[in-house]
Image (cartoon, rainbow, N blue to C red):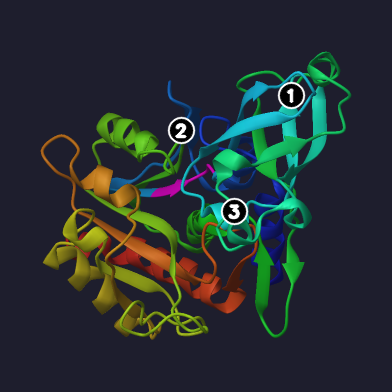
Amino acid sequence: MNEIKDLLEKLSNAHGISGHEGVVRAIVEEEIHPYVDEVSTDKLGNLIATKKGEAPSIMLAAHMDEIGLMVKYVDNDGFIKFVKVGGWFDQTLLNQRVIFHTEKGITTGVIGSKPPHVMKEEDKKKVVNADDMFIDVGAKNKKDAQKLGIVEGTSITIDREFRHMANDMVTGKAFDNRAGLVMLIEALKRTDADVTVHAVGTVQEEVGLKGSKTSAFGLNPDVAIATDVTIAGDHPGIEKKDSAIEIGKGPSITVLDGSGRGLITSEPILKWLKETAKRKKISYQLDVSSGGTTDATAIQLTKAGIPSGTISLPTRYIHSPVEVISLRDLDRCAELIARAIETVNEYF
């Protein structure tokens, strides 16, 4: 369990928004290299690690990018306006500390807005939108900010670090989907199956499932599993009818997401994953979701169609800087994927 914790901490603390996954990719390549026969990076930036074997071939996909921000422009007073990269809930952004990743190095800033002390009473009751926020880096003016390397297109991430909580719970940024990368790497460590495995760290998932489309097209595997996180419905403010998934009850196997506009998992995939979990005595949950989807949606529509499923980690406060997961759940997710690799030739 300590190895899983250490790997998740390393990946969570790394920074890489969509289109800027290089630091994360380097970590994944270093970690996965001993367990595969070859590693390459394709034209879009996907990391493709292949363990050669017999048919069928299986693709494991975990996206490397995290949601973040990007500089839109710097005003004359040195304050920065930004755009969101990926699906933010605006209220989580206000008053966060952020990191600018410039060609000159790292610069720290804070997200601010008009203080409530000078707001009209009716304005205090309204949610502050991201469009009304700005970032303060301490610059005296626009020229001063530019000297720091802050220009249009500079990527920005949230300044948060991995922390332990009670029991086996941990919190940090970008568990979506650095936890999925942990599952992928750990699964390869735990299996010696003789089938061909393509372990892919995909790019730009948060902005349109882009990396999974191109990598699946190039690999054309017989079957695929995407690893990701899913909404845990076991805390105040959410009802079981919205999400019946709970932390501590093991991996989540997706039946349907995005109300069917995303993934509708085929019966052979569900049978394979559920029967493998039962045979190996791994507790699991079934997820039927109305919102969100994963790389599996893009993979299943590649070429003539690739049977695809998703194994997800129950996670609280997704798309925030303080996501919460259970390390025990993460361990069981990796275990299910490893055992599924070993049974895939019985089903496909």
Q: Can you identify the residue that label 3 sits on?
A: 174
Badge 3 crowding class, 10 Å Cα cut-off, few under 14, some 14 to 19, many 20 or more, is many
Q: Nearer the viewer, residue 73 or 230?
A: 73
- The quadrant of the rendering that contains the N terminus is bottom right
The magenta stretch spans residue 116: no
Q: Amino acid at mark 3?
A: Ala
In the figure, 51 relative to 42: above or below? below
Task: Answer with the quarter of the image where residue 22 lies.
Answer: top right
Q: Earlier in the sequence, mark 3 or mark 1?
A: 1
Q: Kindly identify the residue that appears in the image at 41 percent across and 38 percent down.
A: 207
Spatial separation of the CA atoms under disc 3 and disc 1: 20 Å
Q: Can you identify the residue that label 2 sits on?
A: 46
Magenta segment boundaries in residue numbering: 61-65
Q: Amino acid at mark 1?
A: Thr
Percent x, y of residue 198: 38, 43
Total numbered badges shown on the rendered structure: 3
Q: Amino acid at mark 2?
A: Asn
In the figure, 134 relative to 164: above or below? above
The magenta stretch spans residue 64: yes
Q: Main secondary structure of the magenta part?
A: strand
Query: CB atoms at circles 1 and 2 under 8 Å apart?
Result: no
Q: Nearer the viewer, residue 140 or 4?
A: 140
Q: Can you identify the residue that label 1 sits on?
A: 102
Would residue 3 appear left or right of 280 to someone viewing this image? right
Disc 1 element = strand
Q: Kindly identify the residue that appears in the image at 78 percent across and 19 percent down.
A: 149
In the figure, 163 relative to 105: above or below? below
Percent x, y of residue 98: 73, 43
